[in-house]
Image (tube, grey):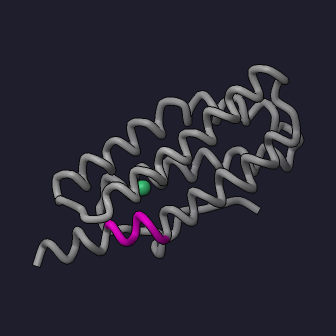
Amino acid sequence: MGIQWRESLSIGVEAIDNQHKELLVRFDRLLNACQSGKGVEELKKLQTFLGEYVHSHFSDEEELQRRHHYPDYDAHLAQHKYFIDQINTLEAETTLEGVSTHHVVETNNMLLKWLLNHISKVDKELGTYIQSQKH
Ligand SMILES: [Fe+2]
């Protein structure tokens, strides 16, 4: 059971959709690695990737919102901060305790779930707003 980007997740902004695709590809690798018992190794790779990619992805999205004077900017920003906090907490825990299976499970359950929910609701609302500005 992997995860794939699907058209229903499109927010109508190609650059952002592509970044979401990349994020899901990386989470999919973790899900696949779990099936072959390599979840712990793959989680380390995902953490390294997320540590950089999420910051640049979120700042691209936030920049887009500022450019379009998005009215829900503050609430959206707060959601991004929450996710970054979660990643930092995971990083702190795994640095202290080492990566173990429960971190892998938490990442699949919490981070991936948050991401899909965020894209399909909060980012999609942003996409709808930007589309509406074009007309
Ligand atoms: Fe977002």
Q: Quadrant of residue 65?
A: bottom left
Residue in view at x 79 percent, y 42 percent: 104
- Classified by dominant secondary structure, the portion drawn in magenta counts as helix
**Left or right: 52, with 62 as reference point:** right
Residue 62 on the magenta span: no
Task: Classify 10 as above or below 112.
Answer: below
**Left or right: 52, with 127 as reference point:** right
Residue in view at x 61 percent, y 32 percent: 88
Q: Quadrant of residue 55?
A: top left
* Furthest residue in direction top, as rendered: 96
Magenta-tinted stretch = 121-126
In the rendered image, residue 57, in percent from the top left (x then y), is placed at 40, 43
**Left or right: 1, with 70 as reference point:** right
Residue in view at x 40 percent, y 70 percent: 124
Q: Quadrant of residue 3?
A: bottom right
Q: Quadrant of ligand 1?
A: bottom left
In the rendered image, residue 70, in percent from the top left (x then y), is placed at 24, 62
Task: Classify 53 as above or below 11.
Answer: above
Quarter of the image with the C terminus is bottom left
In the rendered image, residue 83, in percent from the top left (x then y), is placed at 55, 46
* Furthest residue in direction left, as rendered: 135
Q: Nearer the viewer, residue 107 or 23?
A: 107
Q: Nearer the viewer, residue 7 or 85?
A: 85
Residue in view at x 37 percent, y 72 percent: 125
